[in-house]
Image: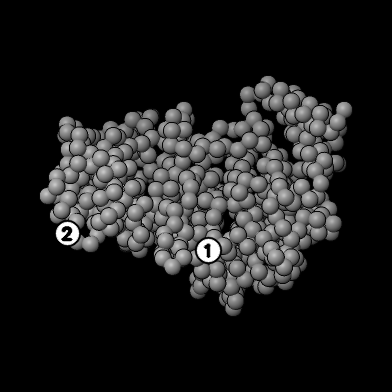
């Protein structure tokens, strides 16, 4: 029997086994032979044996497929090239790495390590910034109320943590446990999103999450992001050299303690330091990536976790490609002087492209110059306080993601906003019409979100979208050299729906009410003395999850009327059936509300307790 035939037979057997199960296989950390002896196997339940057998078959099939492929074919499939003169910085040489380190991963060439360090931190990076990025692990909160959230102890890496957090919430809330780790979730259009059969869950689901389920969601999230960066061809996973294999399989606490002790005196202050400590695993299948990430979870929980994941994303994208994505590749990705994650880092993790802008598509500046934005739909979106201050315009790709989860940016921090029900993004007929017109308007807006287009573009839009404005109104709008969105929008509000406008012919469009949840993972520490140890860390701010009640009037409701709007009450068990209370409650305001209003204009928000913080 040929290798291919045997592989097919193994895959078919694994598929039959998976169809016999009602639950998905639970990822487990790899163990040594001594820890996985005959005594442990004898104690396995039938379900556990079935899951183990399926995983073994899938891994064996994947290994056979890799062995059967030549090294040239692997490099071609992964689209990773060595740092030769013609393609320096595009990726890591697989042949060289495998020859040096075999199955344990490969080293990063010195010139590529220098390029990587310079790309992230630039020249003359301060020790404070390096300390921030070398002391942030990827680990969940120990508080029951925020147990689904990743904790941030240091300033700077919040952009990395928030992006991972968004994907973790996607897998916890909306993606069922997979019977196989090979096939990714691929919801790429609005129809699939709206027809989802997911039943909304109550907020207390977070307090009952098991560590194993959270770890599965984290591993799947990290794998999904890295393959997104790798154009769904490969994921490069960065780890550290010199960590003993016997930590795998130990209890989580002892694993973390062993690794923390080993990393106690380790510092990374240059590209040569990176080259000495990094180990790179290249995974061309998601099953292999998940297997590697499961094994390396203790390393990603360590103080180098956030930095290692950023390096993994950059290498998966390819350093040369990352620089091509950027508008100004001369600037470091970690911004000075405070070490914040740049918009390029966040966009890379959310969209797979390290572009600097948040608008849709690209804007032609003339003379062959252009600036690039987001080019495709995303799983997790992005909102920013800067849009409410008119510094930028977030496009529809980031504003309306496949799932109701958004990274929220302020001037100095990233947090996460999400809903438990996909219906919060549904639009009625007139709102859908406005979105259609706005999308056409933005496609002609060459100001980078300034909100105006040329007269020629305006005439083209009203013709294509069959907007039958009166001749006098058209001439009035065209009296200047450009058309401003607010003026066009007001004209559409006065134009009947039958003529292509937004005027409600019935006057019965109802207000919409729903809940959003805001998570801020920052847990600032006040440390006594110069040495940091578990005994003298005193949290002065814990991670916080805030439930926000939102009432959204029709978009054409006047500003004055929104002040006295009642807020939504969803005291029942089903959050998707929000009703409005009869007695108005006062609208509350915080910077988060300004962010929410960039997605839902004129939204009225209300919450219990302290205002949610986005800093």
SS for dot 2: loop
Name, please, the residue furthest toward the top. Answer: 20
Horizontally, residue 116 falls left or right of residue 106, namely: left
274 or 11: nearer the viewer = 11
Residue 367, picture quadrant? bottom left
Quarter the N terminus occupies: top right
- Give how far apart the Cα atoms at labels 1 and 2 are: 38 Å
| Residue at the disc numbered 2 | 479
| Residue at the disc numbered 1 | 326
Residue 233 is situated, as x and y percent measured from the top left of the image, at: 66, 47
Residue 271, picture quadrant? bottom right
Residue drawn at (86%, 41%) of the image: 34
Placement of 220 over or under 453, stated as above or below: above
Residue 457 is situated, as x and y percent measured from the top left of the image, at: 29, 53
Quarter the C terminus occupies: bottom left
508 or 112: nearer the viewer = 112
Sequence-first disc among 1 and 2 = 1
Placement of 282 over or under 134, stated as above or below: above
Asked if residue 322 can be seen in this view, the reply is: yes
Residue drawn at (76%, 58%) of the image: 93
SS for dot 1: loop
Residue drawn at (80%, 36%) of the image: 60
């Amino acid at each position: 029997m040929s290798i291919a035939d045997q592989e097919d037979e193994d895959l078919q057997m694994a598929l039959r086994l998976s169809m016999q199960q009602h639950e998905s296989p639970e990822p487990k950390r790899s163990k040594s032979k001594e820890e996985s002896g005959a005594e442990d196997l004898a104690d396995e339940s039938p379900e556990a044996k079935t899951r183990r057998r399926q995983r073994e078959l899938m891994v064996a099939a994947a290994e056979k497929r890799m062995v059967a492929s030549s090294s040239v074919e692997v490099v071609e499939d992964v689209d990773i090239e060595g740092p030769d003169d013609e393609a320096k910085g595009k990726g890591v040489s697989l042949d060289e790495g495998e020859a040096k380190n075999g199955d344990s991963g490969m080293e990063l060439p010195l010139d590529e390590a220098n390029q990587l360090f310079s790309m992230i931190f630039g020249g003359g990076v301060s020790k404070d910034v390096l300390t921030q990025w070398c002391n942030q692990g990827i680990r969940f909160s120990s508080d029951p109320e925020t147990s689904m959230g990743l904790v941030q102890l240091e300033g700077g890496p919040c952009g990395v943590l928030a992006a991972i957090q968004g994907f973790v919430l996607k897998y916890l809330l909306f993606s069922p446990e997979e019977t196989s780790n090979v096939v990714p979730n691929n919801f790429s259009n609005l129809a699939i999103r709206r027809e989802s059969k997911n039943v909304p869950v109550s907020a207390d689901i977070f307090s009952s999450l098991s560590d194993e389920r959270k770890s599965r969601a984290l591993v799947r999230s990290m794998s999904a992001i890295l393959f997104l960066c790798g154009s769904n061809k490969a994921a490069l996973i960065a780890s550290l050299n010199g960590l003993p294999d016997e930590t795998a399989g130990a209890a989580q606490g002892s694993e973390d303690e062993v690794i923390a002790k080993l990393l106690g005196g380790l510092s990374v202050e240059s590209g040569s330091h990176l080259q000495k400590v990094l180990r790179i695993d290249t995974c061309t299948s998601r099953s292999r990536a998940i297997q590697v990430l499961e094994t390396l979870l203790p390393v990603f929980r360590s103080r180098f976790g956030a930095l290692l994941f950023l390096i993994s994303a950059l290498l998966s994208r390819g350093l040369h490609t990352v620089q091509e994505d950027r508008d100004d590749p001369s600037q470091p990705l970690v911004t000075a002087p405070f070490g914040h994650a740049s918009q390029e880092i966040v966009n890379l993790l959310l969209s797979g492209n390290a572009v600097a802008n948040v608008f849709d598509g690209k804007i032609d500046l003339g003379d062959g110059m252009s600036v690039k934005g987001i080019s495709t739909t995303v799983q997790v979106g992005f909102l920013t306080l800067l849009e409410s201050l008119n510094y930028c315009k977030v496009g529809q790709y980031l504003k309306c993601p496949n799932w109701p989860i958004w990274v929220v940016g302020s001037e100095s921090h990233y947090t996460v906003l999400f809903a438990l029900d996909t219906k919060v993004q549904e639009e009625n007929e007139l709102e859908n019409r406005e979105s259609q017109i706005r999308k056409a308007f933005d496609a002609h807006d060459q100001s980078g979100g300034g909100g105006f287009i040329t007269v020629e573009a305006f005439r083209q839009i009203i013709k294509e979208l069959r907007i039958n404005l009166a001749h006098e109104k058209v001439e009035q709008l065209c009296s200047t050299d450009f058309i401003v969105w607010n003026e066009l929008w007001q004209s559409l509000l006065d134009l009947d729906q039958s003529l292509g406008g937004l005027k409600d012919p019935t006057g019965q469009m109802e207000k919409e009410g729903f809940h959003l949840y805001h998570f801020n993972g920052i847990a600032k520490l006040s440390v006594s003395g110069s040495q940091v140890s578990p005994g003298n860390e005193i949290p002065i701010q814990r991670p916080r999850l805030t439930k926000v009640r939102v009432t959204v009037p029709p978009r054409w409701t006047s500003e004055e009327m929104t002040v006295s709007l009642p807020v939504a009450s969803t005291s029942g068990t089903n959050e998707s059936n929000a009703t409005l209370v009869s007695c108005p409650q006062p609208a509350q305001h915080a910077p988060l509300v300004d962010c929410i209003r960039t997605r839902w204009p004129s939204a009225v928000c209300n919450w219990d307790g302290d205002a949610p913080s986005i800093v």
